[in-house]
Structure formats: C-alpha cells, structure tokens
Amino acid sequence: MIKIDQHDEAANFLMLVADQEKNLKEVCQISPNEALNLIQPLHAILDEEIKKGPHIITTDLEANCELNCHCGIYSDLAKSKRMKDSLFKKAQTIPKKALIACAEKTARWFCASKLLETLKSEATTSNSTNGL
C-alpha cells in the first residue's frame, strides 16, 4: 500500500498548491494551474491502484489516519460501511494546519521525485493531445 499512500500524499500536496495555500512553504516551483493539470493523471493512477485491490484497512490505520492525512483514500479502500463512514468523517475534519504539515513532509520527497517527472510528462502529452 506504500504506492497508494505516496500517490495520495502527492494528490493532497497538489490540491493545496492548486488552492494557492499561503502557508505552504515549498511548492516545487509548480503554479496553481500546473498543479491542477498534474492532478488529473495522478487521479487516473490512483483509480487504477484502487481497482487492483484488495486493500486491507486495519483498525490501526483507521485510528491513525489523521497523522498521515490518508483518511480520504482509506475511506475509498475500506470494505465495511462503518469503517468507510468513520474514515470519511475523519477526512472531512482534518484541520488545515495538519494538511499543511502533511504537504510539507510530502514536498521533501515529491519535488525531486520520478513521480513528479512522470506526471509532468503525462500532463504535457495530454495537453498537446487536447490541443492546449
């Protein structure tokens, strides 16, 4: 599940960049518009990983999801309705300060990552295919 976690971290980071979060110190020299373009191929990757399943979300992951800002993705992966609902509720109530802290941690690895290179390449290909 490490890949899903990393891709989720990258998606959360890019959302904050796209939203022009003022308190986010490192944005990897990505503009808000570019972040929006990078999110599209990343969501496609996440959708494929989710489909691959099965993914086991333990009560331990559920209890600590706010610490790593993965409550939303874990909600998508959870099998039981009770756990899905619990994780979804937690995802909706994670404080902005915690999301920024998670994004700052993500920036440490994401800015120089192969994932960012891949997303930029895919976004460029998609934009040229769509005539943008």
Image (cartoon, rainbow, N blue to C red):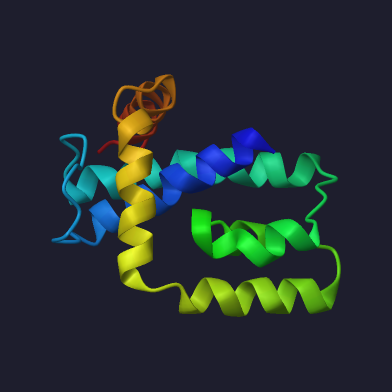
Placement of 98 over or under 95, stated as above or below: above
**Left or right placement of residue 70 versus residue 29 in this view:** right
**Left or right placement of residue 90 versus residue 78 in this view:** left
- Number of numbered discs overlaid on the protein picture: 0
Q: Quadrant of residue 1?
A: top right
Compare residues 125 and 46 and report the one nearer the observer.
46
What residue do we see at 63% from left, 35% from top?
Answer: 2
**Left or right placement of residue 93 versus residue 105 in this view:** right
Q: Quadrant of residue 122?
A: top left
What residue do we see at 79% from left, 39% from top?
Answer: 52
In the rendering, at what x and y percent does residue 95 appear?
38, 74
Placement of 97 over or under 115, stated as above or below: below
What residue do we see at 25% from left, 38% from top?
Answer: 132
Compare residues 73 and 124 and report the one nearer the observer.
73
Placement of 74 over or under 95, stated as above or below: above
What residue do we see at 38% from left, 23% from top?
Answer: 113
In the rendering, at what x and y percent does residue 14 appear?
33, 48
Compare residues 80 and 116 and report the one nearer the observer.
80
Q: Quadrant of residue 105?
A: top left
**Left or right placement of residue 25 versus residue 18 in this view:** left
In the rendering, at what x and y percent does residue 53 appear?
81, 43
Q: Is residue 76 visible?
A: no
Placement of 69 over or under 51, stated as above or below: below
In the rendering, at what x and y percent does residue 96 appear?
33, 70
